[in-house]
Amino acid sequence: MTKRQKKGDANYVNNKEFTKALDIYARAQRKHIEENDGERIKMNDYLAGCIVKMSNRLCTTPRFSGYPFKEEMIQNGILAAVKYAHKFDGSRFNNGFAYVTQILFSHFILTIKAEKK
């Protein structure tokens, strides 16, 4: 069993900082895609690290316990979060943590469905 995450823990993601960084990245990415015919820019280390931490933490919830393909779920979730991060709109929403968590969650479920087939 894991203990509850606290503000100073290594796996803690600060929602305000994460949302601000995600919004800055999304705006720059959309502008770059428009100017360079779909070419993408590299995500900064802070955002990438937060997405990895969020994916690893979400995988430890009881809903996803007992599956032998957790690493594949984590990898698919991270890939999807990076793929769709540029669609975040900070002017409409103020919770980047929830946005990324929903992407991770839905791709975890998609991975489970694909493995069951």
Image (cartoon, rainbow, N blue to C red):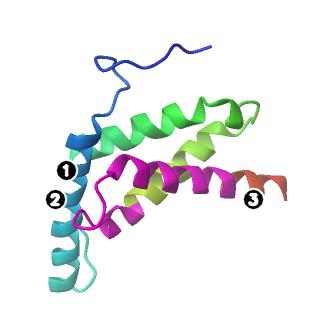
Cα gap from disc 2 to disc 3, whole angstroms: 34 Å
Q: Are marks 1 and 3 in contact (CB under 8 Å)?
A: no
Classify 75 as above or below 4: below
Residue 72: image tag: none
Give the spatial CA distance, label 2 vs label 1: 5 Å
Instruction: Report whether residue 42 is seen.
Output: no
Q: Main secondary structure of the magenta part?
A: helix
Against 23, residue 105 (above or below) is: above
What residue is at 24 percent from the left and 62 percent from the top?
A: 90
Q: In front here: 54 or 52? A: 54
Q: Nearer the viewer, mark 1 or mark 3?
A: 1
The amino acid at mark 3 is Ala
Residue at 42% x, 49% y is 98
- The residue where tag 3 is placed is 114
Give x and y (percent) for residue 30: 22, 75
The C terminus - image quarter: bottom right
Contact? badges 2 and 1 (CB < 8 Å):
yes
* Start-end of magenta stretch: 83-110
Check disc 2 and give the amino acid type: Ile
Which element carries disc 2, helix, strand or loop? helix
Q: Residue at x 15, y 67 (%)?
A: 28
User: Does 93 appear in magenta?
Assistant: yes
Q: Which residue is mark 2?
A: 24
Determine whether, in the image, residue 98 is placed left or right of residue 61: left
Q: Position of residue 54 (x, y in %)?
A: 43, 38
The image shows residue 39 at horizontal and vertical percentages of 25, 76
